[in-house]
Image (cartoon, rainbow, N blue to C red):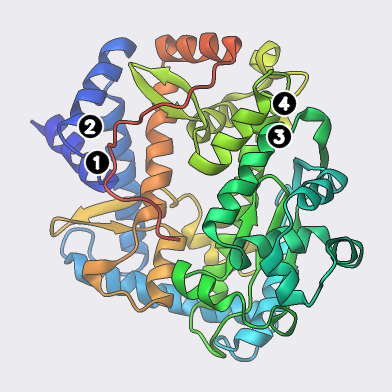
Amino acid sequence: MLMVIMSRQLSELLGASEPAFSHMIRDLESVSGMPSVDVRLMADTEGLAISKIREIGLDGHDFTGEELYVSLQHLTKQHDAYLAKALGASDATDVQDLLPRIKKALESLPVAKSCWAIKHSTARRMLKKNAPKKVMKVLGYRSLDSMLKRENIDELYAALRFVESDQWMERFVKSYKQLGAQDFEKRDIKIYLMSATKWSGAHDEFVLRRRKNYTYLKEMGVVAVLPMPVSHLKGLTITLLPLLVHAINEIRLYSAFFKLHQVRPDFGDILYKTLLQDSAHQISLAGRPVHWRHVSSYFSEHGVSKYSEIFEPHVQPEDLEYRRAEEVLYKLEPALKFWEGMEAVGLSLDDRPISFNLIDNAVSYCNDLPYAQQAVSRMRENLWTKLWVRYINQEALEAQAVEQLGDNPVETMDIEMFVSGGLVV
């Protein structure tokens, strides 16, 4: 009975749809020899949550979900003030002062920033074939050649995301089908602060609609921080800095995926579908597609070198290395050590999930989200990864994964939706 309860709690934390989730777990357990992976994961998750609950001063067994949420929000507020002060800010809400400090701090963090991205010469050639007329208008250019000669190509590509229409972007990304490995190169990820004056408010609609002031380009290795339509915002530092670390990790995640498939004759089609549809479902286990995010996380933790024949020479161990924000931010402010290792931790109380994930709590604080509407998407994303990594670690399933990776398959699969809702930020 306890195992059934733990499995149901895990399903609730993941926001999984039933009975699809239970069927998936049953099949994975059957193939792997019934190791109760889901129950063990839930027990470990609950143990970590209880330890943190005691650390913030609540009784380990006598508290409500709302009391826990309020306590986590209070801690988030404190840590935002500490972090902003560590960056040299005197006002933890001053947007104009904080954005350059956040950029500088991000560049100093011990996070790997190399990636495999489209060559700048190729990027310019592609824009010559697909003139971004709205970008040209905002910048005051009549000549495309003049704009390409004078403007930073990385910033131009970032601007495409918030200036050009979704329809134009879809047509443009479709042109990536023509690209091959020769159009890519290894270089460092660049972080840009986009100028409010230069872009004349063209970014405001994007920021308000997407509810975020940054964008990142997996294919270009670019993270762009956009000006905000407000002068003061609480929680900016503790929200934006981890999100930008996440953006860097996402660029590197897909960079490794593209590198792995660079010799395939349909590389351009893989690039296009991955960027437009996120079709990076690398393998299938127990009849379910497994995203590259989970596969790469497993091999990052358990060693790429063990299966060098699969990854080399194109993907090296360092390509799969990543550092979560929770693992590095305490180097700027020691108090943030509290969040380390909690990226996939949550509790289900009052029939609703409560996240211990730093980004979730920061997003909730920054947006004044009430208890009933708190952010949980990052916790869920990481918990799904933990679940898949633990199943791939079972001998029978690892063998299946290795065999499929050796065949280097990529499929655009119709995914059975186990999760209700996607990422918020």
Nearer to the camera, 314 or 134: 134
Q: Which residue is mark 3?
A: 319
Q: Judging from the image, what secondary structure is the residue with disc 4 in?
A: loop
Q: Answer with mark 4 or mark 2, whichever residue precedes in sequence.
A: 2
In the rendered structure, which amino acid carries the disc numbered 4?
A: Val
Q: How many marks?
A: 4
Give neighbour class at mark 3: few <14, some 14-19, many 20+ (Cα, 10 Å): many
Q: Residue placed at 40% from the left, 54% from the top?
A: 423
Q: Is residue 221 above or below residue 385?
A: below
Q: CA distance from mark 3 to mark 4?
A: 6 Å
Residue with the most extreme left position: 1
Q: Position of residue 168 (x, y in %)?
A: 59, 55
Q: Is residue 185 above or below residue 170?
A: above
In the rendered structure, which amino acid carries the disc numbered 3?
A: Asp
- CB of mark 3 within 8 Å of CB of mark 4? yes
Q: Residue placed at 36% from the left, 50% from the top?
A: 422
Q: Judging from the image, what secondary structure is the residue with disc 1 in?
A: loop
Q: CA distance from mark 4 to mark 2?
A: 32 Å
Q: Answer with mark 3 or mark 2, whichever residue precedes in sequence.
A: 2
Say which mark, if any, is on residue 21. 2
Q: Residue placed at 31% from the left, 52% from the top?
A: 346
Q: CA distance from mark 3 to mark 2?
A: 32 Å
- CB of mark 2 within 8 Å of CB of mark 1? yes
Q: Which residue is mark 4?
A: 315
Q: Is residue 358 above or below residue 301?
A: below
In the rendered structure, which amino acid carries the disc numbered 2?
A: Phe
Residue 232 visible from this viewpoint: yes
Q: Judging from the image, what secondary structure is the residue with disc 3 in?
A: helix
Give neighbour class at mark 2: few <14, some 14-19, many 20+ (Cα, 10 Å): many
Q: Answer with mark 2 or mark 1, whichever residue precedes in sequence.
A: 1
